[in-house]
Structure formats: C-alpha cells, structure tokens
Amino acid sequence: NTVNAFANMDHPHPELFDAVAKAAIHIIDSFNSQDIANTVNAFAKMDHRHPQLFDAVAKAAIPTIDSFNSQDIANTVNAFANMDHPHPELFDAVAKVAIPIIDNFNQQDIANTVSAFAATRHSTQT
C-alpha cells in the first residue's frame, strides 16, 4: 500500500521502492492477489525496475492465479508488460484462467490484458 500511495501521488522515491521490493520478496507468498497487482502496478507507474521483485511476484502468482479477479489479472500482466519484463509462464497461466472467465472482465480489463499480451508478443496455445 505504501508504494501504491507514492505512485498514485506520482512521487518517486527510489530508496523506498528498493527497500519495499527487498522486503516484499521475502514475504510475497503472504500477499493476496490485490496486494500483488497493486505492488507491481505501483512499480510500473513509477517506472521503477526491480527484476528480482517481478520474478518473485510471478513465481508467487502462478500457483494462485485462479484466485485473481479480472482487475488483478489485468493490472498484473499490464505492469509486467509496461516494465518490459516478459514472463511466459505467468502469461500462460493467466491465459488459462482468463479465457474461461472473460465474460467477467470489463472493457478496461480486457483492453489492459490484451495490450499486455500484445506488448510482450506473447502467444499461447490454450
């Protein structure tokens, strides 16, 4: 929530973002889907690159991706795309979950998800 607040205020603070990333990596398994989406979205909004955090997020998100709602899915993959941090396993997991529930996505969720797949040039065979 802290980095999300800084991002919403468009207030860069690289030291804070680095400290949060370092701490989050160790407790990422305790994050729920909204925590995950908000965290990576904040880093993307501030264009603050932290590949280790994004890798840890993907690793934590993949086994729980079916618990993500449409907005969490869209915001997560959009953040990965905006940070130019492709993660094929995450995007494959998202495709498997998103396709059956696509009717639950609003227009913005669909646009963000499709845009993320296009930006990363990710295709899947689900």
Image (tube, rainbow, N blue to C red):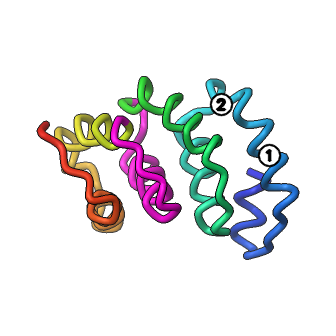
Assess disc 2: are there few (<14), some (14-19) or many (≥20) residues with their C-alpha within 10 Å of its C-alpha: some
Give the secondary structure at mark 2: helix
Q: Which residue is painted at 42% across and 38% down in the image?
A: 68
Q: Is residue 106 left or right of residue 60?
A: left
Give the magenta-colored segment's residue range: 67-89
Name the residue beneath numbered marker 1. 20
Q: Is residue 53 magenta?
A: no
Q: State the residue lying farthest toward the left.
A: 125
Q: Nearer the viewer, residue 43 or 65?
A: 43
The amino acid beneath tag 1 is Val
Q: Is residue 20 left or right of residue 32?
A: right
Q: In the rendered view, would you say 34 is above or below 82? A: above
Q: Is residue 73 magenta?
A: yes
Question: Horizontal and vertical percent for residue 20?
Answer: 79, 46
Please identify the dominant SS of the magenta region: helix
Mark sitting on residue 28? 2
Q: Which residue is painted at 63% across and 68% down in the image?
A: 47
Instruction: Tell me the CA gap for discs 1 and 2.
Output: 11 Å
Task: Determine contact: label 1, label 2, CB under 8 Å.
Answer: no
